[in-house]
């Protein structure tokens, strides 16, 4: 039986964990509190690995980022589309979260003093102070804004380093990825404990909360795929975008939905780009690049879950702060891990903008793991289909 369970996919294991957690909460409510240790251990593991994950992955991706070979005339506008698409996706998530606000069931510490951000000047001041924080202190205190800033600065500096140094950074990123894969492999146990405890305490309200959150997340991603992306493609190609949009969703998005990996979908996108007539030299650079940094779905996930946390904690947010959040979500999404559910681990970066503690942010990450069965699949489908969509649009567009 254990051998059979070991062969199951992570998604299947999480589904089983959710079902068992709900069953324990319904039939053995007195046992549920004792299972909280499983959830606490899982959240603690995420909390310990997240700072170094963000630091190493962003640092390595920037240091090893290469664009060249005479393709700059096409690659640069494709990159612009990637960045603009992620930013507009984050703004879409902001609008959706305000129209349909979500709340979460969080274990808040007693007498928690939440300091909501004040004026725009105060927000910018706090951001600047976080940017220049000592990197060792930023890592030890999980100051994700400071971690992100140092990762970007050092990544740019390492672009001029020796190739051996860049290889070391790549190896370090791969090593951290392996560690997080191990942590996530224990997600079914943590989710089992979290679901059992949460359902025992909140009952069906928890299910309604998850359903509402999923609706906002998936609805936002569908709006990006069917409205925002077509508008961008139409602006570039000056033609009806929907035939191309639907073809990319059908032949790339559906495959990515089930593989849940933009990297694994690269061969599919390269083959589709070739059949769409995209120049091979452009596609061979732009599509692998998109699989690394073009994460519109991650922008939506980070923004929606952060604003759900803000709403739960009763923190009021003005337009300027939401605009800054969209920028932070865009930058954070570029550093999303290559593992399934990797974007969830970037949520603490955005939560740091609102002075939300890492303990609370990691509870939100765990909630994201529970709904990741649909959230992560839809997110990956949007990410991967956008890669080939934007690459084809620029290749077909007028050259200047």
Image (cartoon, rainbow, N blue to C red):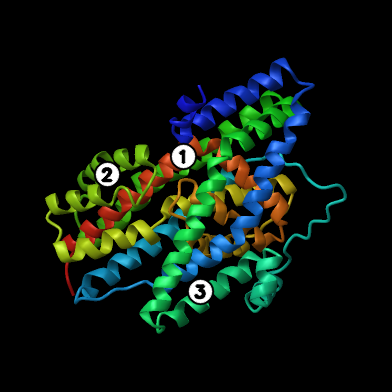
Query: Which residue in the protein does label 1 denote?
Result: 218
Where in the figure is residue 7, as x and y percent of width and height?
43, 31
Where in the figure is residue 157, as x and y percent of width and height?
46, 82
Q: Quadrant of residue 168?
A: bottom left
In the picture, the disc for residue 152 is 3
Count of numbered marks: 3
Looking at this view, is 98 or 247 the one in front?
247
Distance in Å between CA atoms under marks 3 and 2:
31 Å
Distance in Å between CA atoms under marks 1 and 3:
30 Å
- Label whose residue precedes the other's in the sequence (2 or 1): 1
Position of 26 relative to 360 (above/below): above
Query: Which residue in the protein does label 2 denote?
Result: 252
Assign a secondary structure to mark 1: helix
Assign a secondary structure to mark 3: helix
Position of 60 relative to 381 (above/below): below
Q: Quadrant of the C terminus?
A: bottom left
- Label whose residue precedes the other's in the sequence (1 or 3): 3
Query: Which residue lies at the image location 86% right of the left edge and 47% below the top edge?
Result: 110
Left or right: residue 24 versus residue 173 is right
């Amino acid at each position: 039986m254990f051998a059979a369970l070991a062969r199951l996919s992570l998604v299947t294991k999480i589904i089983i964990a959710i079902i068992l957690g709900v069953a324990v909460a319904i039939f053995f409510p007195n046992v549920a509190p004792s299972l909280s240790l499983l959830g606490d251990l899982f959240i603690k593991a995420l909390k310990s690995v997240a700072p170094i994950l963000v630091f190493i992955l962003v640092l390595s991706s920037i240091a090893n980022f290469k664009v060249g070979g005479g393709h700059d005339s096409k690659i640069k506008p494709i990159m612009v589309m990637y960045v603009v698409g992620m930013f507009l996706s984050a703004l879409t998530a902001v609008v959706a979260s305000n129209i349909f606000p979500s709340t979460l069931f969080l274990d808040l510490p007693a007498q928690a003093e939440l300091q909501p951000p004040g004026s725009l000047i105060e927000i910018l001041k706090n951001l600047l102070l976080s940017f220049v924080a000592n990197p060792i202190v930023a890592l030890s205190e999980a100051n994700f804004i400071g971690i992100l800033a140092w990762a970007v600065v050092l990544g740019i500096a390492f672009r001029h380093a020796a190739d051996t140094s860049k290889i070391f950074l790549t190896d370090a990123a791969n090593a951290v990825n392996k560690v997080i894969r191990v942590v996530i492999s224990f997600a079914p146990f943590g989710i089992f404990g979290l679901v059992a405890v949460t359902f025992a305490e909140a009952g069906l309200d928890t299910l309604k909360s998850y359903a509402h959150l999923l609706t906002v997340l998936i609805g936002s991603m569908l709006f990006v795929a069917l409205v925002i992306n077509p508008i961008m493609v139409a602006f570039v190609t000056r033609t009806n975008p929907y035939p191309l949009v639907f073809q990319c969703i059908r032949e790339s998005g559906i495959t990515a939905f089930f593989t849940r990996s933009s990297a694994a979908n690269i061969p599919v996108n390269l083959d589709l780009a070739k059949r769409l007539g995209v120049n091979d030299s452009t596609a061979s650079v732009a599509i692998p690049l998109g699989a690394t940094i073009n994460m519109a779905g991650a922008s939506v996930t980070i923004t929606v879950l952060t604003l759900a946390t803000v709403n739960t904690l009763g923190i009021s947010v003005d337009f300027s702060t939401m605009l800054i959040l969209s920028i932070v979500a865009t930058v954070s999404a570029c550093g999303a891990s290559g593992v399934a559910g990797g974007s969830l681990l970037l949520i603490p970066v955005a939560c740091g903008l609102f002075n939300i503690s890492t303990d609370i942010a990691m509870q939100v990450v765990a909630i994201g793991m529970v709904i990741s069965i649909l959230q992560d699949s839809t997110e990956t489908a949007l990410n991967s289909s956008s890669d080939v969509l934007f690459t084809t649009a620029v290749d077909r567009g007028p050259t200047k």
